[in-house]
Image (cartoon, rainbow, N blue to C red):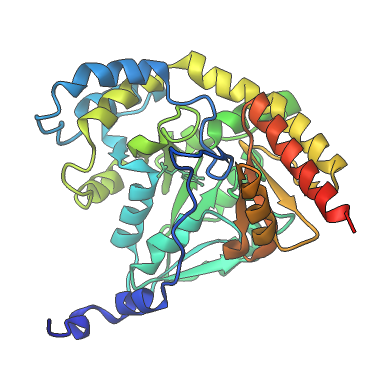
Amino acid sequence: MPDFSPFIPAHIRKLAEGSQSKPLKQSQRSNKPIALNLNENPFGPSPLALQEMQKVLIETHRYPEIHATSLTGTIAEFHGVQPDRILVTAGATELLCIVARVLLGPGLNAITSERSFIVYKLATQVTEGKLVEIPTRDNGYDLGAIAGAIDENTRIIFISNPNNPTGTLLTAAEMDWFIERLPEHVLLVLDEAYGDYATDFARQRGVEYSHAFDYIRADRNVILLKTFSKTHGLAGLRIGYGIGPARLISAFAQVRSVFSLSSLALAGAIAALRDENHIGQAVANNSEQSELLTSKLSELGVSVLRTWANFVFCELNEDAAAFADRLLSRGVLVQPLRMWGAPNAVRISIGTPEQNARLIEAIRGLVRGAAKP
Ligand SMILES: *Cc1c(COP(=O)(O)O)cnc(C)c1O
């Protein structure tokens, strides 16, 4: 076959040449390790979603609703916002890619923090725009430095609140401060994928978490990201949404892949949105287990950041990739963070009480093994 590569845009060619990324380690059906690496719901999918999906299986020869009208209406009612401010996408990930594709181009930039959600980088890379990563402050976003880095070519700020992978929180007051400093040519992508967990922690700890819906109602340049991948337990379905100004939402809608939302995902999400029992179970378990896990890990000499999400960021005294490999040989999968510039850190998702006990047991085994002469 003739070499077609000269006709591939240079910025994409460069990505393909530089790509040596190993496939993501994921739990397989056979010989399944305990998967504490991707912040999934440890209790499985919403049972209400499963029931609804069973019903529509028989209809899968039909194309799905092209504009996701039913789910959009359900979400609009749930949050009390107008449907024209909502865009449903194949996970929050698809929306991040759309936002980057629409708003970035040669000479333009997006800003985020170091040690934040890896998809911000992936979404920006395929545009010709640049991603500026501001160093962390107290392991989280340095809003002052981010505000200071905005220039006339900035179009997007990506903020994950709480942040993945450090689990840190920005309070509502801190975000209010930041919003006031946003120039008109910049869109804030406010990613609250872990919002259900953070809301619960904030209530317990007496902190005000988020004014995101105030920003939406005031029609600020903010798009709020939500997902069904976390508390709803539907990561494999690929469904999420954004809420923002109608004029932007309608532009983003033009770029969404046609029929990217399957009929199963649409039906499952409608049911899962109001599955309070399932969401509540995940949240309650998480609040309880995060404390237990944090104290047990600390006893084992692992230093753990206080989390506002369903995972803990842990600093080790050793290379985290090697640690993760040894842990996997003991049946537990965790996420080493070298790609995030933290070679001695791992992110561990908070599991069920049984899973967490097995994690602690496995780490204890490693520590004992290392102590042997
Ligand atoms: C898990 C996660 C999401 C969800 O992404 P989906 O594509 O909806 O699965 C979004 N943002 C952050 C920061 C996350 O960790």
Q: Is residue 78 above or below residue 176?
A: above
Q: Residue furthest front?
A: 373
In the picture, measured across the screen, residue 367 lies left or right of residue 130, that is right
Image quarter of residue 269? top left
Residue 107, position in %: x, y? 38, 77
Residue shown at 49% from the left, 55% from the top: 158
Residue 250 image offset from top left, x and y in percent: 23, 45
Taking the spot 68% from the left edge, 29% from the top edge, the residue there is 201
Q: Nearer the viewer, residue 26 or 56?
A: 26
Q: Residue at x 57, y 18 (%)?
A: 281
Q: Is residue 293 left or right of residue 65?
A: right
Q: Which quadrant: the N terminus?
A: bottom left
Q: Is residue 140 at least partly visible in the picture? A: no
Give the left or right position of residue 170, taking residue 317 as reference: left
Image position of 65 with respect to 305: above or below: above
As rendered, which of 151 and 200 lies closer to the eye? 200
Q: Position of residue 112 (x, y in %)?
A: 54, 60
Count of number-bearing discs: 0
288 or 212: nearer the viewer: 288
Q: Is 236 situated above or below 82?
A: below
